[in-house]
Image (cartoon, rainbow, N blue to C red):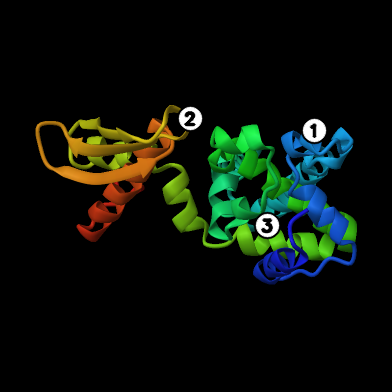
Amino acid sequence: MRERQNLSLLEEKIGYTFQRRELLEQALTHSSYANERRINKIGSYERLEFLGDAVLELVSSEFLFARHPELSEGDLTKLRASMVCEPALAFCARDIGLEEYILLGKGEEATGGRRRDSITSDVMEAVIGAIYLDGGMKPARVYIDRFILSDLEHKRLFYDSKSNLQEVVQGKLKKDLAYELLDVQGPEHCQTFRVQVRILEGETLGVGEGHTKKAAEQQAAYKALLVLQDRGYKPGDI
């Protein structure tokens, strides 16, 4: 497993010290690593992810229920889905550098698994499950509040950047958008895409990079939104 010093650094980042360190180690273990080291499959993060997903759903539902008494059940469901979807959880995980602690098999590592949203989001939920088993609901709630439910306005702007940008540009500016691939670098299994977004037949608003074209477009859209906000335009002003 990772050196205990490194796991101590992670505990410092998340503000929680495990009584049973093996739960944190399991939460960081991908099935490819477990298979490679001949660890039983239940030694990977999958079962903890299952539990963490349920804890996250309860805490986020309670949070939204209290914060938005004006919203219907359908609107609350949509809002919760946007907050705890795969890209959103991956974004939160990278905020604390969680991907650097994931234990991957050599093949998964070589094909860019450490950068996959699907893996980082799963580990984020597995850590929630591990904290819940180790310390109960209170520290699990603190972790979720601190790293997932905080700074929601900023995070939602990023999560929904492409749709928010389209809303502003088409609705307020009465223009059309175009995303253009500028460059692709790196080997096929670990490529970096560079994309620009611009007003059709007009200026470039943002340039983004990512390990998928979709991720690069999202980052470009987010940067464009920040530019337009500086000019007084933002989602919801239409």
Q: Which residue is mark 1?
A: 35
Q: Residue at x 72, y 47 (%)?
A: 125
Please, what is the three-letter code of the amino acid marked with disc 2?
His
Looking at the image, tell me whether mark 1 or mark 3 is earlier in sequence order.
1
Q: Nearer the viewer, mark 1 or mark 3?
A: 1
How far is disc 2 from disc 1 in space, using C-alphas? 21 Å
Of the pair 66 and 138, the residue shown nearer to us? 138
Of the pair 216 and 141, the residue shown nearer to us? 216
Looking at the image, tell me whether mark 2 or mark 1 is earlier in sequence order.
1
Where 81 sits versus 69, above or below?
Answer: above
Please, what is the three-letter code of the amino acid marked with disc 1?
Asn
Q: Residue at x 90, y 62 (%)?
A: 20
The numbered dot on residue 224 is: none
Residue 197 location (% of width, % of height): 24, 38
**Count of marks, rendered view:** 3
Tell me the quarter of the picture where residue 43 sits.
top right
Q: Which residue is mark 2?
A: 189
Q: CB of mark 2 within 8 Å of CB of mark 1?
A: no
Q: Residue furthest left?
A: 201
How far is disc 2 from disc 3 in space, using C-alphas? 44 Å
Per the image, label 2 sits on a secondary structure element best described as: helix
Tell me the quarter of the picture where residue 67 sits.
bottom right
Per the image, label 3 sits on a secondary structure element best described as: helix
Please, what is the three-letter code of the amino acid marked with disc 3?
Ala
Q: Which residue is mark 3?
A: 66
Per the image, label 1 sits on a secondary structure element best described as: helix
